[in-house]
Image: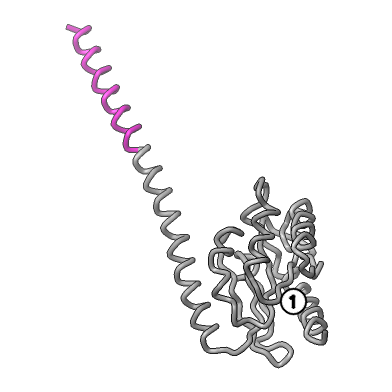
Amino acid sequence: MRGAIAWTMITVLLIAFVASFSELQRMRKRFAEVARHTFHDHADIRLTVIKTALAQERGPIVLLGDSVAEMGRLPSQLCGKPVVNAGIGGATLSELGRIAKEFDSASLVIVVAGSNDIGSTSFEQDYSQLLDALQRRSIAVPATSSEATNARIISAAKGSKKRVLDIRFSEFDGLHPTPKAYREWGGKMVDAISGECAK
């Protein structure tokens, strides 16, 4: 009798474990779907905002990139031209390359990207393709938290015969610069872009 009860309990526990494990796997898959969905919603909304801003301006200076660019702040005008922040959090180099044609009206595109491609084996190729796709005047800025990646940005830009503004952030909190680093970087960027406009 006790043996039958023990086997029944073991069977019930085993069924409960399998059900729990199955539910856990289902929830993990759902969380992954939600995370992807959230990024794509953000990217779609940001792109709509960016397109709207571009449509309202003539020959803007564009700050293009990932979340490092999106969080960056420049004055609303530089060199007498409007500034459009076209940073898209989570964007990779290849994703930015696919929307490069949206920036054909820009007078200058400052590329602050690469943080989401750190360690990619095709980094230089993807970065060069992005710069080449930005048919207008584009400038690369090595502004990731990885010095090795910053060196790859400079190499890719030189390979594409594009200019580099070697203005790096002084400190990071993970992948993103600290508020202090953004303030310092913003001032240096204003000076550098103003110098570019004078050329």
Task: Kindly indicate the quadrant of the structure image that contains residue 154.
Answer: bottom right
Residue under the point 76% across and 72% down? 185
Residue 144 on image: x %, y %: 71, 59
Q: Is residue 90 visible?
A: no
Q: Residue furthest left?
A: 1
Instruction: Choose between 158 and 17: the one closer to the eye.
Output: 158
Which SS class for mark 1? helix
Residue 66 on image: x %, y %: 61, 64
Using residue 110 as the reference point, say whether residue 30 is left or right of it. left
Q: Is residue 9 above or below residue 151?
A: above
Q: How many marks?
A: 1
Using residue 86 as the reference point, say whether residue 119 is left or right of it. right
Residue under the point 69% across and 58% down? 173
Q: Is residue 27 magenta?
A: no
Instruction: Choose between 42 and 119: the one closer to the eye.
Output: 119
Q: Is residue 62 above or below residue 42?
A: below
Residue 2 on image: x %, y %: 21, 8
Identify the residue position indicated by label 1 in the image. 186
Q: Which span is picked out in magenta?
A: 1-23
Task: Kindly indicate the quadrant of the structure image that contains residue 90.
Answer: bottom right
For badge 1, the amino acid type reads Gly
Instruction: Choose between 2 and 39: the one closer to the eye.
Output: 39
What secondary structure characterizes most of the magenta part?
Answer: helix
Task: Kindly indicate the quadrant of the structure image that contains residue 104.
Answer: bottom right
**Which quadrant does the C terminus fall into?**
bottom right
Q: Is residue 8 magenta?
A: yes
